[in-house]
Amino acid sequence: MKVYKSIEEFNIDGDTAVTIGTFDGVHTGHKVIIEQLKNAAKKINGESVILTFFPHPRMVLYPDDNELRLLNTINERIEMLKDAGIDHLIIHPFSKEFSRLSSTEFVRDILVNKLNVAKLVIGYDHHFGRHREGSFKHLQELAPLYDFSVEEIPAQEVQQVNISSTKIRKSLLNGEIHAANKFLSYHYFIKGTVVDGNKMGRTIDFPTANIKIDEWYKLIPAKGVYAVKVKLNNSIYDGMLNIGNRPTLNENDNETIEVNIFNFDDDIYNKEIQIEFYEKIRNEEKFEELSVLKKQLEIDKQQVIQILN
């Protein structure tokens, strides 16, 4: 897969099958669109192209709204789309100027003149152009004028629920890991660097690795204790992870992410670590003494072992 940092970098002569979207999470619905895109490219003897954007349009159009968090960092999205077998990935910088293109200008100047689109594949209820004025109906009107065809993929469902990145984000923020993982068709994960902590866990025989997430916009699930798998140095370990403010220690200011890796005692400071979420087992709680916390962690560990096995 070739990756381009803007539409201007893309320059091929042949016909293309194109799809457009943020593809945050590269979830089950996205994968259906991608498979149809690849099939469409084969039928026209052309190449498959995904046009996506970064930053996320909402971050540009509503800069004062800092609440949006994404399921993937841009590097994670690139790797996941690479695994999907696409020929070309264009990551165009989204800007206010770009957002002012009318839907007709977008089709004519971008899809036709820049990307050589012969077949356009879009997801259900896709809108584009200034004020999201462009729709599937509008594309059907423009397609014969600019000599391309368009196909809309129906909404994908898991247990009669339409899949969307927004619904997956809400599931994670509610601690509903099972629902999120079903929508994604993989275990939600975070990556970060192991940093120095207060080492309190060692005093109660539950040492933890404190994780710093490198990208501020990466979504962190709800506070609580989770059953997780830990990927480190090409190995996979079982573990339990806590997200929260460590109320037992009266540390109520900064949210921390710390994981107790089972049967592991190596020095991993400054190393990258990946955490895959399997299930939330309880909310974060405040305990009156460290001895009570230790007893609860022992119960938590046995529950995590049962879940992961």
Image: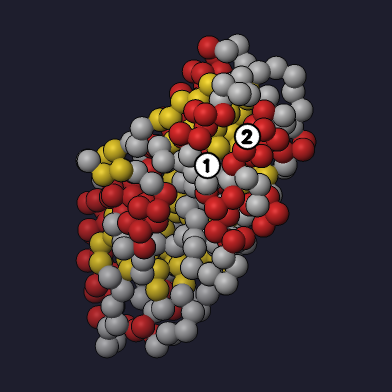
- Around disc 1, counting alpha carbons within 10 Å, would you say few (fewer than 14), some (14 to 19), or many (20 or more)? some
> Toward the viewer: 138 or 286?
138
Which of the 4 quarters of the picture holds residue 214?
A: bottom right
Q: Residue 156's x, y, as percent?
A: 33, 36
How far from the left and from the top, in percent, is residue 41? 56, 18
Mark yes or no: residue 61 visible: yes
The answer to whether 111 is drawn above or below residue 300 in the figure is above
Q: Which mark is residue 134?
A: 1
Front one among 229 and 62: 62
Mark 2 neighbour density, 10 Å: few (under 14) some (14–19) many (20 or more)? many
| Residue at 44% in and 62% down | 220
Task: Give the labeled residue for mark 2.
Answer: 107
- Residue 100 lies, in percent from the top left, at 65, 52
Task: Identify the secondary structure beneath mark 2.
Answer: helix
Mark 2 or 1 closer to N-term? 2
Q: Residue at 39% across / 79% down in the picture?
A: 246
